Amino acid sequence: AAGIMVPTSGQVILTGRDLGGLNEKQRTLRRRSAVGQVFQFFHLLPHLSVEENVSLPGWIAGLPAAATRTRARELLAKVELGDRGADPVGLLSGGEKQRVALCRALLRSPALVLADEPTGSLDDTTGQLVMDLLLDLVRDAGAALLFATHSQELAHKADTAWNLVDGHLVTEESSGAGP
């Protein structure tokens, strides 16, 4: 879905473009501008502050520093970490680290957010809070969310769930409130 790999059959259309028809550089640029990624184990850079970790995608894309800083601060405020921007990420709890990772994924207002087990390294209560926050943030941003989870409870929050059964995808409609 992010265009890291080219499909062996069919098409992957991202923001109106068939990723299979793009070369590696074009797919990278498309991914950078249209996809936000949230990982199970945060992947925050320990030598950067909270705000710097959120700002990283803006720096890589060469966005204006002031606009990037403003957007990072807005997102951190939404996840109740507005007062932690200067803190080293090592001082944060697991739930706080995942909230920073959510902000980083949303910094560039992507059309698609991919989340790989976004609550997998969190306890159940914190995982539920982080997932609800992710759903709210994505909905507010008008983005699509594709997430992988082993939790049936979290999967039911999605509009559509795909289950992997014996190596085959099985689709089932959900009554969840997901985006």
Image (cartoon, helix red, strand yellow):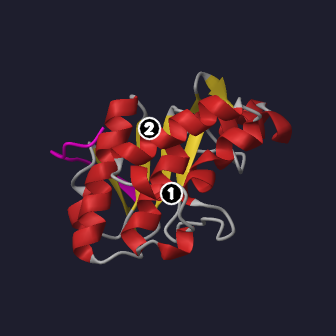
| Quarter of the image where the C terminus is located | top left
Outermost residue toward the top in this view = 16
- Counting residues from the start of the chain, the first of labels 2 and 1 encountered is 2
Number of marks: 2
Q: Please name the residue shown 51% across and 54% down the image.
A: 85
User: Is residue 83 found inside the magenta-colored segment of the image?
Assistant: no
What stretch of residues is rendered in magenta?
168-179
Above/below status of 115 relative to 165: above
Could you say where residue 139 lies in the image, as x and y percent from the top left?
32, 35
**Left or right of residue 46: residue 103:** left
What residue is pinned by disc 2?
74
Q: Dot 2, how many residues are within 10 Å of its Cα: few (below 14), some (14-19), or many (20+)?
A: some
In which image quadrant can residue 26 be found? Answer: top right
Q: Please name the residue shown 31% across and 57% down the image.
A: 131
Could you say where residue 44 lies in the image, as x and y percent from the top left?
60, 65
**Amino acid under label 2?**
Glu
**Amino acid under label 1?**
Ala
Could you say where residue 112 lies in the image, as x and y percent from the top left?
50, 38
Could you say where residue 160 lies in the image, as x and y percent from the top left?
29, 45
Q: Is residue 168 visible?
A: no
Instruction: Depth check: give the residue in front, 80 or 24.
Output: 80
Do the residues bearing badges 2 and 1 touch, measured as CB atoms within 8 Å? no
**Left or right of residue 105: residue 149:** left
In which image quadrant can residue 173 be found? Answer: top left
Q: Dot 1, how many residues are within 10 Å of its Cα: few (below 14), some (14-19), or many (20+)?
A: many
Q: Please name the residue shown 57% across and 50% down the image.
A: 54
Q: Please name the residue shown 15% across and 45% down the image.
A: 175
Q: Is residue 97 visible?
A: yes
Instruction: Depth check: give the residue in front, 128 or 7.
Output: 128
What residue is pinned by disc 1?
101
